[in-house]
Amino acid sequence: MQCVDPELIIPAAEFSGEEEQDVLDAGLCYAAESKASAYLARAEQSRFGLSRKLVSKGMEKQYIDKALDYLKNARFLSDSRYASAWLNCRKAAHHEGRIRLAAELASRGIDRHTAEDALNEYFEENPEDGECRKAVEKCMRRGMDYDKTVHCLIQHGFSPGMTAAVMDTFTYQEKKSR
């Protein structure tokens, strides 16, 4: 897109073919930016998720990309902020390990480096072994036996080593309390 002098955009103005296309392109970019900004005003969004939403609204990818580039450069759009917000929201109802959370972030279009940084920050505040213990307690409340609990923990993204270590503390505590 070339830049058309904004002072030339007045009622009844006429443009050459290339200038006309530039004005139309600018308008379509602005429409994508405006809709993206409305989504961002409600909640953090990932670039991938925002792009999908805008495509579903019938917007063209070339205009979406330019609008999202602008929003990213203006720091309104940040996959890093989105990943942190998503992790903190997720912890309210789910106790999951690094493996599962990394996969969930990847499915939301978050690149490996950004996800790793967000996960490191998240697990500094919420130690993974503590999350694993909470998951074991939840399984116990549901009446799951040892094997089902181990299977559940692995499915929820806890490593086999962490699962075994945490399960051993529960087994040990149960024996000690008898």
Image (spheres, rainbow, N blue to C red):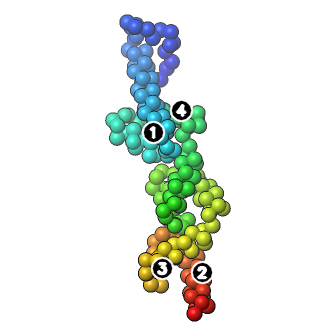
Image quadrant where one finds the C terminus: bottom right
Q: Quick check: 21 above or below 56? A: above
* Residue positioned 44% across, 46% down in the render: 49
User: CA–CA distance between discs 1 and 4?
Assistant: 15 Å
Q: Tag 1, which secondary structure?
A: helix
Under mark 2, the amino acid is: Ala
Quarter where residue 61 is shown: top left
Residue 39 shows which numbered tag? 1
Q: Is residue 57 left or right of residue 40?
A: left
Residue behind mark 4: 70
Residue behind mark 2: 165
**Residue 102 at least partly seen:** no
Nearest the camera: 43 or 24?
A: 43
Q: Is residue 57 left or right of residue 155?
A: left
Q: Is residue 108 left or right of residue 58?
A: right
* Label located before the other in sequence (4 or 2): 4
Q: Quick check: 19 above or below 177? A: above
